[in-house]
Image (tube, grey):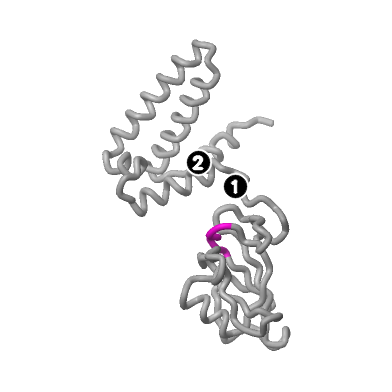
Amino acid sequence: MNQLNIEKLDFAKGGGLLPVIIQDMATDKVLMLGYMNREALEKTLAEKRVTFYSRSKQRLWTKGETSGNFLELKAIAVDCDQDTLLIKAHPIGPVCHTGSDTCFQEENRHKDFIRHLEKVIQDRKANPQEGSYTASLFASGINKVAQKVGEEAVELVIEAKDDNKALFLGEAADLMYHYLVLLTAKGVALDDVVRILEGRHGG
């Protein structure tokens, strides 16, 4: 993300307002478009909740101030002309006043759930939470994590010999999850493995 310097922003071009694109930090889905004056931007940065300038009400408006569906600020960037902002946020509930996930009537969900799950696992390692099974695995040490992967692999092989598709898929999911935990425990990412596979792919 580009470094934000408020003093360099070109508020004058838009009559004191900057268009602001809101994007979901987790899914990359564009949620809405709003406008900020300098005061709204400063309030957003200070409170870590997105505040706009309402052109219809002629006042500052914190998204979610009446509905509770706030936008938690995660990252912010400015475009090359210094007159448009990109804000990555975590939405608390639907974004649109109609109840839709986005103001463009799109469903806000992960395009790549495996990558999302990997990020969650990485966060559990960096920020352990009490009661988290994933955090408890990391706390148990690399040998225990590796052992769990082995156990899940064996269980998957056993289910592969039978004809219960639901049980097979359940074990496959368990193995995938513990495999991602092992990768994270070793300090590598799924993309590192993908690059190895790409290197081996002949055509």
Q: Can residue 193 be seen? A: yes
Classify 158 as above or below 4. Answer: above
Which three-letter amino acid code belongs to the residue tagged 1?
Answer: His
> Which residue is found at the position 52% from the left and 67% from the top?
73
Query: Could you tell me how many numbered marks the image carries?
Result: 2
Task: Provide the major secondary structure of the magenta segment.
Answer: strand
Where's residue 110, x and y in %?
59, 47
Label 2 and label 1: CA atoms lie apart by 17 Å
Where's residue 166, x and y in %?
53, 21
For label 1, the crowd category at 10 Å Cα-Cα, with few meaning under 14, some 14 to 19 and many 20 or more, is some
Q: Name the residue under label 2.
A: 190
* Lower position in the chain sequence, tag 2 or tag 1: 1
Q: Nearer the viewer, residue 9 or 105?
A: 105
- Horizontal side of 31 relative to 147 (left or right) equals right
Q: Name the residue under label 1.
A: 110
> Which residue is found at the position 42% from the left and 45% from the top?
121
Classify 158 as above or below 113. Answer: above
Task: Tell me which corner region of the image, top left, top right, bottom left or bottom right, holds residue 175.
Answer: top left
The segment highlighted magenta reads 88-93
Where's residue 141, x and y in %?
27, 39
Which three-letter amino acid code belongs to the residue tagged 2?
Answer: Leu
Classify 184 as above or below 18. Answer: above
What numbered label is drawn on residue 149? none
